Structure formats: structure tokens, C-alpha cells
Image: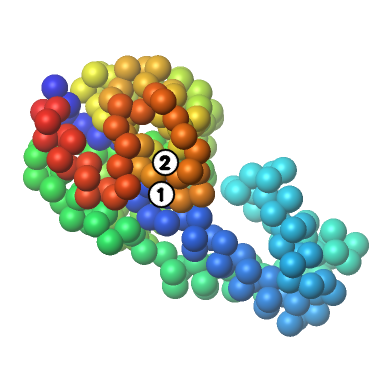
Amino acid sequence: MIKGVLFDLDDTLYNSSSFASRARKEALRAMIDAGLKSTEEDALKILNKIIEQKGSNYGGHFNDLVKAVSGTYDPKIITMGIITYHNVKFALLRPYSDTMTTLMELRSMGLSLGILTDGITIKQWEKLIRLGIHPFFDEVITSEEYGLGKPNIEFFNYGLKKINLKPEEVVYVGDRADKDMVPAKNVGMTTVRILQGKYSEIPDDISDYSIKNISELSKIIKTLI
């Protein structure tokens, strides 16, 4: 019997890929206007490489970009990038249109709800609060808090311990086959993959269910409780 749902956050409850891409492009335009000697296309290639090498949670993306382009440290250009990125990001940050109603429906079923996500705790909480969905969750569990992230099975077991439920009592919802579905399935949870974001076209044969919209989740869970 299902008693709880654990969610990934980025590209699961809101469109992370879309807003991040646009925010980066707007930041680069502002940096170039402020004096960065690069084309937008070249700067984006360098920035994407930095993000690929150091991860999305690294705090010095724009510092490294300026150094790679000009070989110097320019706080004005770096700050212009940071401010523009965050302004655009927060202006665009919205949950999927059916996220709020789905969370309300799951709560009405008496289910425990939690977030199990890679990322820096403060940043993930900031997203949840700005999205307006933080009150729905009993626990918000991050890789920074635990010290290990996805796809480590220990991280998923830690999440189960935090919400005080057994694997067979929990549905895990995420967007990635490799980092979400595989480890969640391996610890014994029922898995639901949402086909949204930049990983949506990557096939998998391990998910128990696949959905295109988060609103489909309620119908699935009603068959499991």
C-alpha cells in the first residue's frame, strides 16, 4: 500500500531546463554589453563546458567564463552576469501548470510528500519557496545534506528513513532514468518517470510508469493505495 511520494525537483515539478537556458543567454548578453570581449555564441560554448565540467551547483561559472575569455578577473562583468541570471531566473520560475493541483490532490489522499534532490539545500529551498509549493512537503532532502547524491542507493535509503516509510510504501517521481528511476527501483520503490526537460527523449525500460504531465500521477497512485 502506497503511503508517500518522493519527488525529484528540477524538471519534475517545474521546467528547469527551459528557464536556466534562457537565463544564461540573457546573462551573457548583459556581460557582453558590459564589456566582455566575446560573441554570444562563443561565450555560451565556454559557459556550457564549464557547467559540464564543474556541475550546475558550482558557484563560479561566470568567474571562470570571464577568466577564460579575457584572462583577467573583472568583478563588474561577473556581477552583471550573476544579477541578470538571477533576475531572469526568478522572473521565469513557475511550477508546471498542473503541479499545484496535483500536490493538493495527493495531500487530500492522506499521503506523505517529500523532495529528494541533488543540489545545495538553500538553493533548493529557495526554488520551492519561490515556486510557492514548499508547504506541501513534509521533508526536503538534498545531496548536500546527506553528503552523497544520485544515483547512490544510500541517498535514496536516507530519504526513506527521513520520511519514515518502507520502500514498498513509496512512489518516486523523477525525470531521469539513470539518476532517478534506476536507484529508486533498486531500493524497492515504485517508479514514475515524467517525460519533461532535457532528458525526456532518453528511453528507459525500468520505470514502472511514464507520464507526460504531472497531473497523470494522481490516477496512477489511486490504483496503488
**Residue 211 location (% of width, % of height):** 30, 42
Callout 2: SS: loop
| Residue located beneath label 2 in the image | 175
Callout 1: SS: loop
Q: Are marks 2 and 1 in contact (CB under 8 Å)?
A: yes
Outermost bottom residue: 33
What residue is drawn where x is 63% and y is 69%?
Answer: 25
**Residue 141 location (% of width, % of height):** 39, 37
**Residue 176 location (% of width, % of height):** 46, 37
What residue is drawn where x is 37% and y is 21%?
Answer: 185
**Horizontal relation, residue 26 to residue 39: left or right:** left
Depicted 209 relative to depicted 123: above or below = above
Chosen colour scheme: rainbow
**Horizontal relation, residue 183 to residue 105: left or right:** right
Q: Residues within 10 Å of mark 1 (few under 14, many from 20)?
A: many
What residue is drawn where x is 50% and y is 55%?
Answer: 17
What residue is drawn where x is 9% and y is 40%?
Answer: 109
**Horizontal relation, residue 188 to residue 18: left or right:** left
Q: Amino acid at mark 1?
A: Gln
Q: Residues within 10 Å of mark 2 (few under 14, many from 20)?
A: many
User: In which quadrant is the N terminus drawn?
Assistant: top left
| The disc label shown at residue 41, or none | none
Q: Is residue 140 visible?
A: no
**Residue 42 location (% of width, % of height):** 79, 65
Residue placed most toward the observer, 132 or 171: 171
Q: Amino acid at mark 2?
A: Asp
| Label 2 to label 1: alpha-carbon separation | 6 Å
Residue placed most toward the observer, 70 or 146: 70
| Residue located beneath label 1 in the image | 196
Rendering quarter of residue 34: bottom right
Q: Earlier in the sequence, mark 2 or mark 1?
A: 2
Rendering quarter of residue 165: top left
